[in-house]
Amino acid sequence: MKHKHQLASIKGLPRNIWAVSVTSFLMDVSSEMVLNILPLFLASVLGVQTTFIGLIEGTAESTASLLRVGSGWLSDRLKSRKWLAVAGYGLSTLVKPLFYFAGSWGAVASARWGDRVGKGIRTAPRDALVADSISENQRGLAFGLHRAADSAGAMLGILGALAAVWLTQGSRGALQASTFRTIVLVSLVPAVLAVFVLAFGSREARRSTPSERVKVRFRGLGRPFGLFLLIVGLFELGNSADAFLVLRARSLGVSVLGILGMLAVFNLVYTLISTPVGILSDRVSRKTVILGGWIAYAAIYLGLGLAGKGWNMWVLYAAYGAYYGTAYGTARALVADIVPSHLRGTAYGAYSTVIGALNLPASLIAGVLWDRFSPGAPFVFGAALATVAAMCFCVWQPASPKAP
C-alpha cells in the first residue's frame, strides 16, 4: 500500500514538475555526452596540463555564477520564471556547435563558458518554478524527481558517448578528435528538444505573493539562510570540478570506455536514489538527510585520495552517485523551506552562485595539489573540508520564513 501511495503521489505531480524534469533529462543527455569526455579531449588531444584543465572548469562555473543570482533576483522582480529558464537553455544549445570547431584550449574554454552562462541564466528561475509549483509536503519529492530525471539523462548521455567511442575508435585507449566531434554533433538533437519541451510544456506558476509590489532584498532572506550559505561555501571549497574524478580514474589506468562505464554507474545510482530520498526528506528532517550525504562525501573523497587500483574507482563512483542522490535535491528543497516565497528566485540564485563561484578556487587548489603533491591530494583536502562543514552544519538551526 505504501508503494502504491508513492506511485500515486508521483503521477499526481503538477504539469510544471514533469515539464522541467523532461527538459533537464534531455539537456543532460546532450551535455553529459560532451562534458564528461571534455577533460580527456583537452588532455589527450590538445595536450593541456591538469592545472589548466582545472582553470577552464573552474572559470566556466565562476564566470556564470553572478548571472545565477542576477537571474534569480530578476525572476522575483518580474514575477516570472519560465522564460528566463527557456532563455538559459536556449543559449546553452546555441553555443554547443562551438565545441565541434574548437582546436585550442582557449576555444574550448570559450565554448565551455558560453554553455555555463546559459546554465547560470536558467538554474535559479527553474528551481524557483519547481518550488512555486508544488506544496511544501511534496517539495522533497518534486526536487528528488527532478534530480532523478537529470541524472537519468546524464546516464543516457554517457552511454551514448560510450557507444560513439566504441563505434568510432573501438577499445583504443586515447580519445580521438574525430570521435569527440561526432559526439558533439549527436548531442545537438536532445538539446534542441529540451528547449521546445520547456517553452511549450510549462507555464508560469500561481504564487501566493501579495498583489502589491514587494521589495526584493537580499537581507530579506534571513540569517539562517546566510549561515547556510557560509557552511555550503566551506564545503564547496573542497569540492573541485568532477573533471578531476575523470582524471583520477585515468591516472589509475582506466580506459576511456571504462571511465564512461563508471560515469554511467554513478548516474544510475543517482537516478535510483534521488526520488526515494526526496520522499524521505518530506517526512524527516531535511537537515539530517543532507548531513548524512556530506559525511558520506567525506568518506568517498578520502577513498578517492587513497585509491590504488582501477577497480577502486568503480566502487567509489557508485558511492558518489549515492551522495548526489541524497544531498543535491534535498538541499534545494531546504532552500525553499527557509526563505520567503517571493524571494525564492533570489535565494536559489545566491545558493547556486556560492557553488559556482567557489568552483574556480576549488579547482585551482585541486590542480595545484595534484601537480605539486599527488593525484590523491585534492581528494584528501576535499574530505577534510567536508568534515569541517558537516560539523558546522550539525549546530546550524533552520527557521521558518517570514511572510512578505
Image (cartoon, helix red, strand yellow):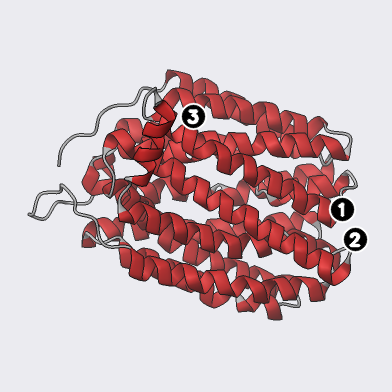
Q: Residues within 10 Å of mark 3 (few under 14, many from 20)?
A: many
Residue 160 x/y as whole percent:
69, 62
Cα–Cα span, label 1 and label 3: 33 Å
Q: Are marks 2 and 1 in contact (CB under 8 Å)?
A: yes
Q: Are marks 2 and 3 in contact (CB under 8 Å)?
A: no
The amino acid marked with disc number 1 is Ser
Label 2 or label 3, whichever comes before in sequence order: 2
Badge 3 is on which residue?
290
Residue 308 x/y as whole percent:
88, 34
Residue 170 x/y as whole percent:
89, 65
Q: Quadrant of residue 374?
A: top right
45 left or right of 19? Answer: right
Badge 1 is on which residue?
255
Q: Is residue 242 visible?
A: yes
Q: Residue at the location (76% across, 60% down)?
A: 162
Q: Residues within 10 Å of mark 1 (few under 14, many from 20)?
A: some
Label 1 or label 3, whichever comes before in sequence order: 1
Which element type, helix, strand or loop, lies under badge 3?
helix
Badge 2 is on which residue?
171
Q: Residues within 10 Å of mark 2 (few under 14, many from 20)?
A: some
| Camera-nearest label, 2 or 1 | 2
View extreme (top): residue = 395
Residue 247 x/y as whole percent:
79, 50
The amino acid marked with disc number 3 is Ile
